[in-house]
Image: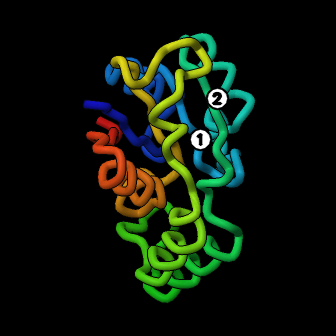
């Protein structure tokens, strides 16, 4: 059975992030962020160029999948709900129901996830034969991030077993 993991940026530093990926035997990182930068000096390591350099040194392939990223409008919808509840992006615990509904119908339903699970990783590792891929976004908790919706869809449609990696 195909296995995948998800991981966020928050709660990690660059070294602990790479160690967590190595421990899970991740060979391909699928970046599902719209903007591939993270605010704050403690997360500069997760900005696209730095992250790709570190991943290459760790022998982990990288792919950006902007078609799975929420639109600016959807992110604003979630930010408005966060403000209504008095929580910040870094402390959010769940996604707004309207965000989930719209992300599912506008982004996930039209998306073809088959290529993610059926093609070799760009480093030559065949994901169907034991290589592990990781879905990456920013939020620490998958329940507060669209990557959990992608993971759920992969489980439902492709029988993928998904583990959510969190900081230790």
Q: Which mark is residue 51?
A: 2
Q: Position of residue 105 (x, y in %)?
A: 53, 74
The residue sitting at 66% across, 39% down in the picture is: 64
What colour scheme governs how the chains and residues are painted in the rendered image of this protein? rainbow
Q: What whole-number distance in Å separates the C-alpha atoms at marks 2 and 1?
A: 10 Å
- Is residue 108 shown left or right of residue 54? left
Is residue 69 depicted above or below 11 in this figure? below
- In this view, the residue farthest toward the right is 49
- Is residue 83 shown left or right of residue 165? right
Q: Position of residue 33 (x, y in %)?
A: 62, 50
Q: Are marks 2 and 1 in contact (CB under 8 Å)?
A: yes
Residue 67 placement: quadrant: bottom right
Which mark lies nearer to you, 2 or 1? 1
The residue sitting at 31% across, 41% down in the picture is: 160
Q: Position of residue 121 (x, y in %)?
A: 55, 22
Is residue 23 depicted above or below 73 in this figure? above
Q: Which mark is residue 124?
A: none
Is residue 150 depicted above or below 120 in this figure? below
Residue closer to the observer: 55 or 98:
98
Residue 58 placement: quadrant: top right
Q: Earlier in the sequence, mark 2 or mark 1?
A: 1
Q: Is residue 163 visible?
A: no
The residue sitting at 48% across, 47% down in the picture is: 10
The residue sitting at 33% across, 39% down in the picture is: 165
Quarter of the figure that contains the N terminus: top left
- Is residue 148 shown left or right of residue 3? right
In the rendered image, which residue does mark 1 sit on? 31
Quarter of the figure that contains the C terminus: top left
Q: Position of residue 31 (x, y in %)?
A: 59, 41
Residue closer to the observer: 145 or 4:
4
């Amino acid at each position: 059975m195909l296995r995948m993991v998800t991981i966020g940026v928050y709660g990690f530093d660059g070294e602990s992030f790479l160690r967590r990926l190595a421990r899970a035997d991740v060979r391909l990182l699928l970046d599902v962020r719209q903007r591939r930068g993270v605010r704050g000096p403690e997360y500069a390591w997760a900005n696209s160029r730095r992250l790709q350099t570190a991943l290459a040194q760790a022998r982990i392939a990288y792919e950006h999948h902007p078609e799975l990223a929420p639109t600016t409008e959807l992110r604003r919808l979630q930010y408005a709900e966060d403000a209504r509840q008095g929580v910040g992006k870094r402390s959010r615990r769940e996604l707004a129901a309207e965000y989930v509904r719209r992300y599912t119908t506008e982004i996930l339903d039209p998306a073809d996830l088959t290529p993610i699970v059926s093609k070799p990783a760009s480093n030559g590792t065949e994901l169907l034969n034991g290589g592990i891929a990781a879905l990456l976004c920013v939020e620490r908790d998958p329940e507060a991030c669209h990557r959990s919706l992608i993971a759920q869809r992969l489980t439902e449609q492709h029988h993928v077993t998904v583990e959510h990696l969190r900081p230790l």
